Amino acid sequence: MTELRARLAELRATRPDAVRRAAVDRGPGPSLAEAGRFLLIAADHPARGSLAVGDRADAMADRGELLSRLLVALSRPGVAGVLGTPDVVEDLLLLGALDGKVVVGSMNRGGVPGTVFEIDDRFTAYDAATLADMRLQGGKMLLRIDPDDRSSADTLEGCARAVSALADRTLVAMVEPFWVRRDRGGRAVNDLSTDAVVRSVAIAQALGSRSAYTWLKLPVVPDMPRVLAATTLPTVLLGGDPHGAPDETYAAWRDALGLPGVRGLVVGRSLLYPPDDDVAAAVDTAAEML
């Protein structure tokens, strides 16, 4: 892993042009529509300073370790590609790990947990023009709506502009909406009740000047049939931070994947940092569901 980091650091310092060359040379990957039912590996958590996995506070802090786990995951059958911020995607491009893969770029990672501006999910990473230039397949955006924080209005507007800009370039806009509440300590917490998820879906699917290229990225909650009944847009399921026994998590994913409109899974920490650290086995279990 040290050798991997050193090789990338040297290449980035001496040949920064290698990133775009790698993006062009890999050619256009398959579109999300062409991918059928798919599994994407999410790797955009570090960009918001979210390094914890379960009880491991700094699990994702070591970039070489993260990349090594991503290389294993991307090599497994059934894995369509990755969702990540420019730094991670470019490392993987330089390593030649994204040939023939779907790549979705993460766009807004400005709301850093634990800060006074946490709910301000402004756009700090990919924009639509760069996603098109790098021949990626779409952009993902986080939409957190806190009824007690005015910053949510700015996020709504920013996401609407991004949806429109992506649609203008026929790129998928993958919107991840949450209704947010505050716990007793004032911390922003995603409300995973069915009512809250349905409400967030109603708002997210209407963003932008066109919805033809909009997809939804939704959490798995108890009443998923009711959630899916709220939209006609293609939907993918997010894995989230692992809680409880893996078998219970996999069972919930499997049930939700059988519902109309669900196109696949986008999972990161649960598969990259499983309790037994067997990345290949965890990824294979998820891929077999598809």
Image: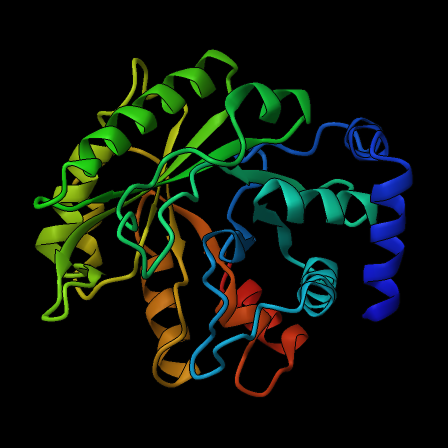
202, 178: nearer the viewer: 178
Left or right, residue 16 beside residue 32: right
Residue 79, by quadrant, is bottom right
Q: Residue at x 42, y 33 (%)?
A: 123
- Residue 133 to residue 63: above or below: above
- Residue 237 to residue 244: above or below: above
Residue 249, by quadrant, is bottom left
Q: Residue at x 53, y 75 (%)?
A: 58
Residue 37 coordinates in the image, percent (x, y): 51, 48
- Residue 236 to residue 34: above or below: below
Residue 7, by quadrant, is bottom right
Residue 78 coordinates in the image, percent (x, y): 64, 57
The quarter of the rendered structure image containing the N terminus is bottom right
Q: How many discs mark residues in the rendered view?
A: 0
Q: Residue at x 33, y 29 (%)?
A: 159
109, 289: nearer the viewer: 109
Q: Residue at x 17, y 53 (%)?
A: 180
Q: Residue furthest front?
A: 116
Residue 267 coordinates in the image, percent (x, y): 48, 60
Left or right, residue 172 beside residue 118: right
The image's colouring method is rainbow
Residue 30 coordinates in the image, percent (x, y): 65, 34
**Residue 98 visible in the displayed image:** no
Left or right, residue 177 beside residue 100: left
**Residue 163 visible in the displayed image:** yes
